[in-house]
Image: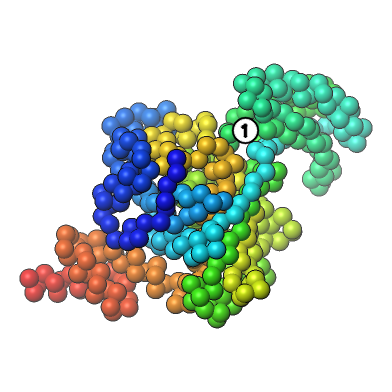
Amino acid sequence: MSVNSRIPGFYKLSPADRFKAVVELTGLPESELASLTQPNPDILSIADRMIENVVGTLSIPVGVAANFTVNGRDYLIPMATEEPSVVAAASNMASVARINGGFFTSADQPIMISQIQLVGTKDPYGARLKLYERRDDILALANEQDPVLVKLGGGARDIDVRIVEAGVGRIYVVLHLIVDVRDAMGANAVNTMAEALAPLVAEIADARVRLRILSNKADRRMARVRATYDAAALGGPDVVDGIIDAYAFAVADPYRAATHNKGIMNGITAVVLATGNDTRAVEAGCHSHAAAGGRYTSLSHYEKDAAGNLVGTMEVPMPVGLVGGATKTHPVAQAAVKLLGVTGAQELAQVIVSVGLAQNTGALRALAAEGIQKGHMSLHARNIAVMAGAQGEEIEAVVAKLRSGGHVRMDRAHAILDEIRQGA
């Protein structure tokens, strides 16, 4: 599917008209995207199969980020988020990145790790080498658990055995099973393999197995992105320097880095959620990577090129898939994947990190220029107006007065609404 994601005035359209525009641009049948806008009558029964004790569902707004070019291809990107300004900021920075070709990305093979923890080993270093000696047997047994994955070109690739000293006299031998999970996120596949390996591994090491579960520190499954943002389009050299100062602050100070990286995850998590992937796994992997050097720091990097333009780069773990889980069971996730038009997990990962970098750049630009609240609270004004009780045409009238006054607060919204109704 080839689309042009450049849609001038997209934000001005009504939700219904935006939906029609997306249908026309993608060429997909409206029925395939209907779940993005229409409540599905079967959704409760689907939810009941997904988790326990279901009593209902929670709807999150799904927006479409425009202007994205990734590796020379345009994408319309579904983002599920309740936070104002996230979709707008990502789309805005994508339009600036387009000037210099958009986003350029790469991704590792889809490798996941499952850990098997061994306790009570009398000779842990000897046990470690015994496990390496039986590497072929271990891999063969692991691959017997998922012949379909092996047929698709994936499967257990290798092992790594570590000695982990946990203090108070506890020493663990930990076997890492390294698995190519292809287009899956991979949790179920690697956990099944680890469970099956437990008796053999315990026998070889003459030890007892405790935990056998995947690691969400998916540092063998990195996705990388770079973009060059035109200095003039950002607002000039001073804005570029301000963004770099904001980035440098995040590198040096973990208090700032936490908020800086939250901005990145605003973009990443929105696409992960929209496509039915595991937001908690991705968040855990990214934040653990931010602390990989021994202290928590920025996930992204910013610098200037020879022409004074801003260059943003980032590499983060990205364990996402297109098969299994909610991606295949939830109709909205299925529609979102169709809208996005990706064909593999690595392509999805590269699109997601592009959105994360764009969102981060947008937040830093707002901080370096007019301040974060101007744009954020401007969009938030509509929510405040509705919460105050405004209806129909009253909503825009309240929003206009809230914005002109510069203070977007509930008490002002109530007062403005009272004035409007008294004058009607």
- Name the kind of residue labelled 1 in the image: Arg
Q: How crowded is mark 1: few (under 14 residues within 10 Å), some or many (20 or more)?
A: many
On the image, which quarter does residue 27 sit in? top left
Left or right for 242, reference 53: right
Q: Looking at the image, which residue is at 64% across and 21% down?
A: 151
What sort of colour scheme is used for the picture?
A: rainbow
Count every numbered label the image shows and give the total. Answer: 1
Could you tell me residue 71's position as x and y percent? 57, 51
Q: Nearer the viewer, residue 376 or 58?
A: 376
Residue annotated with mark 1: 182
Residue reaching furthest left? 424
State the SS at label 1.
loop
Instruction: Give the quarter of the figure containing the C terminus.
Output: bottom left
Residue 391: percent from left, percent from top: 17, 60
Q: Is residue 331 above or below residue 370?
A: above
72 to 84, vertically: above or below: above
Q: What residue do we see at 85% from left, 28% from top?
A: 131
Q: Which residue is drawn at 32% across and 61% down?
A: 9
Q: In which quarter of the image is residue 56?
A: top left
Single out the residue that lies furthest toward the bottom. 238
Q: Is residue 253 something that shows in the picture?
A: no
> Residue 267 at x, y = what percent?
49, 55
- Residue 221 in sight here: yes
Which quarter of the figure is the N terminus placed in? top left
Front residue of 65 and 381: 65
Picture residue at 42% right of the left edge, 28% below the top: 49
Give the percent coordinates (x, y) of residue 303: 65, 70
